[in-house]
């Protein structure tokens, strides 16, 4: 019987189309990509398939004849393969090729573009809420700089002038640091290949940015890092993940409480937990928080895309994201990523 709960897909063609399908389907619930076939063993999607543990085949005919594929997606762009598939496929296998797969491919491209824009939109909306915190962070050292510079204009004692000039330099450096943090966060994630990221360093960078959250008043950050741990990811995306989780936590605590960050290695996995002492999430909402546009914030304040993006990014790097929460006590998010050795 055809199991409508899960669909097993075989991809024919490991070019750019096959690669986009692979990347898309690994984020789809209910879909298993059970193989990808291409007669060219250097086709671009094959490397990606290895990384995602999707079996690769060079024997197209043998692949088509498999009896465990619900849907073959032919993105080879080769019309003779369409014929081959319809003649040799197993009776229960459906085919999406030719015009159908063309339309699908266009939809995917559109989806990929929209997805990238939503990522950026969520980030910029976060940045909007940080604006007053950032202005405050720049204004304080600026105030010091202007005051001291005015003093220097009147000051005769060279030693005092030197001392005050040094304080001006330090204040200027603080502003430089703030600007560096912000630009790093605001930059759209480039599409580079994943690199080794030291996760505790990434957590520390993200805390610096989350501290601009407007309602931050009395927050204690406790760190339990069991040494450095590495995972393969895009550092800008990881920064987005952590900043999102921290700002959610800060909102939930209404600026007052304890944020506990822990990291450790376990059975080849890098684990991170982010625990807050905030309002908690009622059990009926726990399933919904990862859905796009689910938000309990007043309209205009939340996009509801934060956790959706967080989960997509973690999945992309073959990790998992879990949540535990008790109303009135707090919430813990647990991230697991495959650990790598540092170079
Ligand atoms: N740490 C947390 N504590 C309590 N509620 C949370 C926490 N993180 C997320 N939530 C809930 O999940 C919803 C969705 O979060 P998210 O996807 O980041 O969107 P947004 O922050 O824009 O509302 C939030 O509106 C909030 O109700
Ligand atoms: Mg959020």
Image (cartoon, helix red, strand yellow):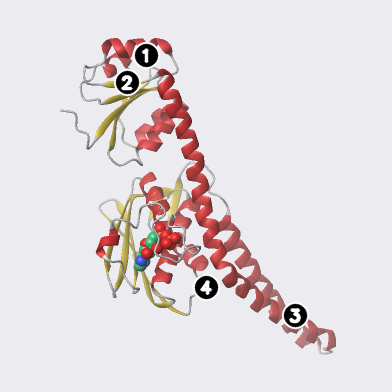
Whether residue 42 is visible here, answered yes or no, is: no
Q: Is residue 333 left or right of residue 19?
A: left
Q: Callout 3: 10 Å neighbours few (<14), some, many (20+)?
A: few
Ligand 1 located in image quadrant = bottom left
The label number, if any, that marks residue 82 in the structure image = 1
* Gap between marks 1 and 4 measured at Cα: 57 Å
Tell me if mark 4 has few (under 14), some (14-19) or many (20+) residues whose alpha carbon lies within 10 angstroms of its own. Answer: some
Q: Are marks 1 and 2 in contact (CB under 8 Å)?
A: yes
Judging depth in this view, the residue of 57 and 131 nearest the camera is 131
**If you read the primary sequence from the N terminus, does the residue marked by circle 1 or circle 2 appear first?**
1
Q: Earlier in the sequence, mark 1 or mark 4?
A: 1
- Give the residue at mark 2: 95
Q: Is residue 225 left or right of residue 210?
A: left
Mark 3 to mark 4: distance in Å? Answer: 25 Å
Of the residues tagged 4 and 2, which is closer to the observer? 2
For disc 4, the marked residue is 214
Mark 4 or mark 2, earlier in chain: 2
Mark 2 element type: strand
Q: Nearer the viewer, residue 242 or 173?
A: 242
């Amino acid at each position: 019987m055809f199991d409508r709960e899960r669909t097993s897909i075989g991809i024919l063609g490991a070019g750019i189309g096959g690669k986009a399908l692979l990347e898309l389907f690994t984020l789809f619930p209910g879909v298993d990509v059970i193989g990808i076939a291409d007669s060219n063993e250097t086709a671009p999607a094959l490397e990606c398939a290895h990384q995602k543990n999707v079996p690769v085949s060079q024997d197209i005919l043998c692949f088509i004849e498999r009896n465990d594929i619900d849907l073959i997606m032919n993105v080879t762009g080769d019309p003779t393969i369409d014929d081959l598939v319809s003649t040799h496929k197993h009776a229960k296998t459906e085919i999406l090729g030719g015009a159908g797969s063309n339309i699908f491919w266009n939809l995917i491209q559109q989806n990929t573009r929209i997805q990238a824009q939503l990522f950026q939109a969520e980030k910029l909306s976060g940045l909007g809420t940080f604006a007053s915190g950032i202005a405050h962070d720049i204004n304080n050292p600026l105030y010091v700089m202007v005051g001291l510079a005015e003093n220097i204009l009147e000051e005769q004692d060279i030693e005092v002038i030197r001392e005050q000039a040094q304080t001006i330099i330090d204040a200027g450096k603080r502003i430089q640091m703030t600007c560096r943090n912000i630009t790093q966060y605001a930059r759209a994630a480039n599409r580079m290949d994943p690199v080794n990221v030291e996760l505790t360093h990434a957590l520390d960078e993200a805390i610096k940015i989350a501290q601009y959250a407007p309602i931050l008043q009395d927050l204690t950050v406790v760190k339990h890092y069991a040494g450095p741990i590495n995972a393969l990811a895009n550092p800008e995306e990881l920064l987005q993940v952590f900043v999102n989780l921290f700002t959610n936590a800060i909102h939930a605590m209404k600026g007052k409480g304890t944020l506990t960050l822990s990291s450790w290695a376990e059975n080849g996995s890098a684990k991170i937990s982010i625990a807050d002492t905030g309002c908690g999430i009622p059990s009926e909402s726990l399933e919904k928080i990862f859905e796009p546009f689910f938000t309990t914030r007043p309209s205009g304040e939340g996009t509801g895309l934060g956790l959706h993006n967080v989960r997509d990014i973690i999945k992309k790097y073959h990790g998992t994201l879990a949540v535990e929460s008790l109303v009135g006590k707090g919430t813990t998010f647990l991230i697991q990523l495959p650990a790598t050795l540092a170079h």
